[in-house]
Image (cartoon, rainbow, N blue to C red):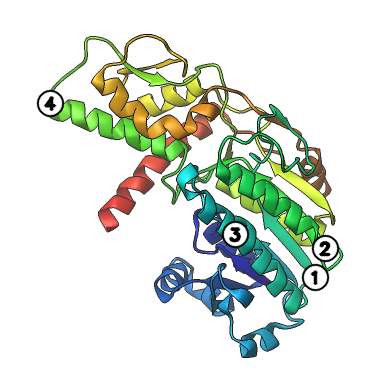
Amino acid sequence: MNILLTGATGFLGKQLTLKLLSEGHSVYALIRNERKADRLIEALPADLQNNLFIIKGNLGDERLGVPFETIDLLKGKIDTVYHIAAYLSFDDRERDKTFEINVEGTRNVLEFSKDIQVKNFYHVSTAYTLGAQLHGREELHPKDNTFVNPYEESKCHAEHLVFDYNNVFNVSIFRPAIIIGDSKTGEAETTFALYGVIRSLELLKKRLDRKQDTPSEKIKFLCNQEAAQNLVPVDYVVNVLALGLTSAKPDTIYHITNSQPPTNQLVLDLIQSALDFYNVELVPTDYEGELTDQDMKLNQPMKVFHKYFEKTLTFDDSNTQELLHENNVEELHLDRETLQMIISGGMKSQDKGIAAK
């Protein structure tokens, strides 16, 4: 098949590109600049590079900034579009930019897909479009929900927009939870969410080691220890997305989530084990005791995640389970050992990334 991807240079997009190419598909990647394109090509085995085609374009432009001649060449040629690209920011000050890229950018991709007459449009959203609810169903959530941040809200609006085009092409929405490293290698090309926590604790350890200063009391991390984080390995997400090519049903939403998510305490234990650093303890986000300067330094960058740290969200993934069953693919089992390996592998990936800069 001929498949067009947005976001092909990102953490998830790159892995999906590799998966699709390895299965014999041709991938047309919409990429903003040559530097990003070159990096994607360099990351691919030589025998797969001939089936990758770069289309220079931008979500913010009408027709994605793609020349009319290219549009004519693509017309009727693309079977499926995976729209992965998005702007990931929880900052209220960036609300306008977030909506511009995640909603209006999605509109531009939809109109472009309509112009080139694609058959299927697969929108990669997020499981966190449920707002203040504690349980997410595989259906559209109301746009007037109370949301944790503008990113969630923008992705919810984008989902409604995508379904408005279900009379133009087959539409499916895929909602991954918190994407972490590969379950076989542990590798992860991201500094977000789990990896932001890992990096913060790693820097804290190095700072204390330099000062040769071991606090008399453990440093407090504001986070509900019993709440769970819905972590999903990137290869599991990619496998579900790839199954969509042959098995996704129109007008259907698929949660790519974890039915047995690890608790915050377990995640912290595994990070501290990987770092050999046991000077941190979890306290509730509404902790009323006094915080030291060291506590404040650790927690300040994490404030945007406090709403997620304090509650456990659950997700119905019946549609995804049916998709897996039809294709004889096992559901996700993220055990302690695998999560430990992913955390350790993520630390190595971050060190490589820093060394490469």
Q: Residues within 10 Å of mark 4 (few under 14, many from 20)?
A: few
Q: Residue at x 53, y 53 (%)?
A: 96
Which mark sits nearer the N-terminus, 2 or 3? 3
Q: Tell me how far mark 1 sits from mark 2, CA to CA.
A: 6 Å
Q: Nearer the viewer, mark 2 or mark 3?
A: 2
Question: Closer to the camera, 149 or 38?
Answer: 149
Look at the numbered discs 1 and 2 and tell me whether their residues touch, using CB distance below 8 Å.
yes
Give the position of the C terminus as an image quadrant.
bottom left
Q: Tell me how far mark 3 sits from mark 4, CA to CA.
A: 44 Å
Mark 1, residue position: 119
Q: Residue at x 21, y 32 (%)?
A: 206
Q: Tell me how far mark 4 sits from mark 1, CA to CA.
A: 60 Å
The image shows residue 115, relative to residue 81, as above or below, that is: below
Q: Tell me how far mark 2 sits from mark 4, CA to CA.
A: 59 Å
Question: Closer to the camera, 17 or 92?
Answer: 92
Q: In the drawing, what numbered circle is on residue 170?
A: 2
Residue type of the residue flagged with mark 3: Leu
Mark 3, residue position: 16
Image location of residue 142, percent across then percent down = 75, 40
Which mark sits nearer the N-terminus, 2 or 4? 2
Q: Residue at x 56, y 29 (%)?
A: 229
Question: Image check: 191 left or right of 279?
Answer: right
Image location of residue 230, percent across then percent down = 60, 33
What count of labels does the image hold? Answer: 4
Q: In the drawing, what numbered circle is on residue 211?
A: 4
Which mark sits nearer the N-terminus, 3 or 4? 3
